Image: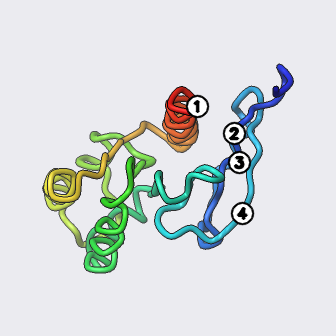
């Protein structure tokens, strides 16, 4: 049984994640390991074939949804095979629509339409968050909820 000051779940961060969350603001701070994931940037140790969460900054979302669209759709296709998959964006809808990255030529309405289409086509959840700190906490909550539900099933 875990101590009160430690969490029983271990978060896996993909080796390709460029700006990984540390989850240092979570109490107790979860264990974090770095490993290659088949899909997404975050998963749970032992459950990598069941859950994946992809993190996107606002600039990354605009770049990925535009120039890297085909590659991202292939990733969404892989994620759709999992029990739970989500994309967490470090920007809220207002930021996406009203404050797109200055260097992006992609229209905000294209991003919004893509999110609507992909969430229906692939069954992947898209979550917009007001900032990076909130996105980190939300990512943890999604992972934790999935882990707790698996514990109940065991």
Of 16 and 92, the residue lying toward us: 16
Discs 2/4, front: 2
Chain-order first, disc 1 or disc 3: 3
Left or right: where 70 falls relative to 154: left
Badge 4 marks a residue whose secondary structure is strand
Residue 128, given in percent of the width and then of the height, sits at: 36, 42
Chain-order first, disc 2 or disc 4: 2
Chain-order first, disc 2 or disc 1: 2
Residue 47, given in percent of the width and then of the height, sits at: 56, 52
Q: Residue furthest front?
A: 154
Mark 2 to mark 1: distance in Å?
10 Å
Badge 2 marks a residue whose secondary structure is loop
The residue under the point 15% across, 58% down is 121
How does the figure colour the protein chain or chains?
Answer: rainbow
Left or right: where 150 falls relative to 111: right
Chain-order first, disc 3 or disc 4: 3
Mark 2 touches mark 1? (CB < 8 Å): no
Of 125 and 8, the residue lying toward us: 8
**Count of numbered tags:** 4
Q: Is residue 63 above or below residue 135?
A: below
Question: Circle 1 sits on which residue?
Answer: 151
Report the disc number at residue 2. none
Question: Circle 2 sits on which residue?
Answer: 9
Question: Circle 3 sits on which residue?
Answer: 22
Badge 1 marks a residue whose secondary structure is helix
Mark 1 to mark 3: distance in Å?
24 Å
Mark 2 touches mark 4? (CB < 8 Å): no
Q: Quadrant of residue 111?
A: bottom left
Mark 2 to mark 4: distance in Å?
14 Å
Q: Is residue 32 above or below residue 73?
A: above
């Amino acid at each position: 049984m875990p101590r009160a000051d430690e969490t029983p779940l271990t978060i896996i961060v993909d080796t390709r994640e460029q700006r990984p969350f540390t989850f240092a603001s979570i109490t107790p701070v979860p264990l974090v390991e770095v490993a290659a994931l088949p899909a997404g940037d975050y998963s749970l140790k032992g459950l990598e074939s069941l859950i994946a969460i992809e993190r996107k900054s606002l600039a990354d979302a605009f770049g990925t949804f535009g120039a890297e669209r085909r590659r991202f759709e292939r990733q969404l296709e892989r994620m759709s095979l999992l029990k739970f998959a989500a994309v967490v964006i470090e920007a809220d809808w207002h930021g996406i629509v009203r404050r797109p990255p200055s260097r992006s030529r992609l229209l905000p309405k294209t991003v919004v339409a893509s999110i609507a289409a992909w969430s229906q086509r692939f069954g992947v959840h898209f979550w917009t968050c007001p900032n990076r700190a909130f996105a980190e906490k939300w990512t943890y909550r999604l992972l934790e909820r999935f882990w707790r539900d698996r514990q109940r099933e065991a």
